[in-house]
Amino acid sequence: MRNSKTPLRLAAVLASAALAVSACGGDDGGDTNGDGGGDDTAAEGGDDGGDTNGGSLTIGIKYDQPGLGLMEGDTPSGMGVDVGVAVAEGLGYSEDDITWQEAPTPQRETLLDTGQVDMIVATYSITDERFQTVDFAGPYFVAGQDLLIRADDDSIQGPADLEGKLLCSVTGSTSAANVQEEYPDVQLQEYSTYSECLSGVVNGSLDALTTDDVILAGYAAQPEYEGQLQLTGNTFSEENFGVGLPKGNEQCEEINDILNGMWEDGTMEQIIADNLGDSYQYNQELNPPEPSAEYCSA
């Protein structure tokens, strides 16, 4: 189903699943929807002992972020997809039990709150504001905000060089909020997807795209953009990626144990390598992060 090397990860995923079970003692984690309902979702998997085998799980991902979350035909691929599969397997689901759904940035809280998805793994930064509406397991990865510019543009080395430039980000993203707060004089264009921003940078109608560096690296690594784009390499934030969950989700801490196990047994490093290869070197001072129950409200 995916482009990643599933057989290579299977043993590691099973190991992280075993870690989660032993750590959580099989608490009643079957209900991943809370009261949100939703058709044919994880709530049907039972509510005793955390045994969700035989149920189904709807996971929200990005459809337009190469290396992170990309849907080509009926086949999803990317780091978020592989993390979603690993978490699902740790909870007792098979990959065939998963239904993938697009989770655009402005709609993520609504998708969780209305029960349209059971979890979201879509470069979803943990923030106090979002925690008012949804829960988060994690963080499972820490990225940093950067700028993506044309390879022949030497006028932009960081956000301080954006005066008089047109910068693009996505409506509802923490990246857009960071720019508006820290650099209010920047001319910020907000679009619904990063792909729209990317097209503008490539054709010259926009000067830069800003979001998490791991997302930008995925775009820059696409064959059709070879030699055309570059990251400035000057990150100016820390973005803690979490697994978004409905408010009050009872499996939040169990998922934290699974995420922690994925770093301990090498699964997460393999996922990063499978999806981003040599195009991205993650910050080893910030990773691996320590998943925390701070954003689990149950």
Image (cartoon, rainbow, N blue to C red):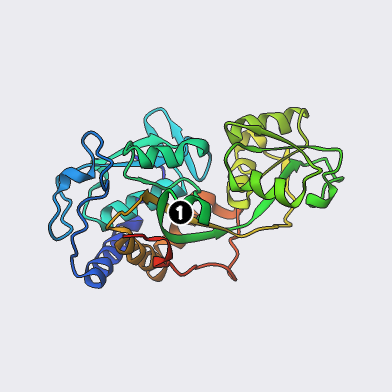
Residue 58 location (% of width, % of height): 30, 40
Q: Residue at x 79, y 42 (%)?
A: 186
| Residue type at numbered disc 1 | Phe
Percent across and percent down for residue 232 are 75, 51
Q: Residue at the location (77% across, 27% down)?
A: 205
* Count of numbered circles on the image: 1
The picture places residue 17, in percent across and down from the top left corner, at: 26, 63
Circle 1 residue: 131
Residue occupying the far front of the picture: 132
> As drawn, is 207 to the left or to the right of 130?
right
Q: Nearer the viewer, residue 285 or 277?
A: 285
Task: Decide: few, some or many residues near mark 1? Use Cα within 10 Å; few <14, some 14-19, many ≥20.
Answer: some
Does residue 57 appear in this view? yes
Q: Is residue 223 above or below residue 297?
A: above
Relative depth, front residue between 63 and 26: 26
Of residues 281 and 165, the one nearer the viewer is: 165
Asked if residue 42 lies left or right of residue 65, the reply is left
Q: Reply above or below: 101 against 46.
A: above
**Image quadrant in which the N terminus is located:** top left
Quadrant location of the C terminus in the rendered image: bottom left
Q: Residue 260, relative to residue 189: is it above or below? A: below
Residue 259: horizontal and vertical position, in percent? 38, 62
Residue 125 in view in this figure: no
Say which element carries label 1: helix
Where residue 216 sits, quadrant-wise, is: top right
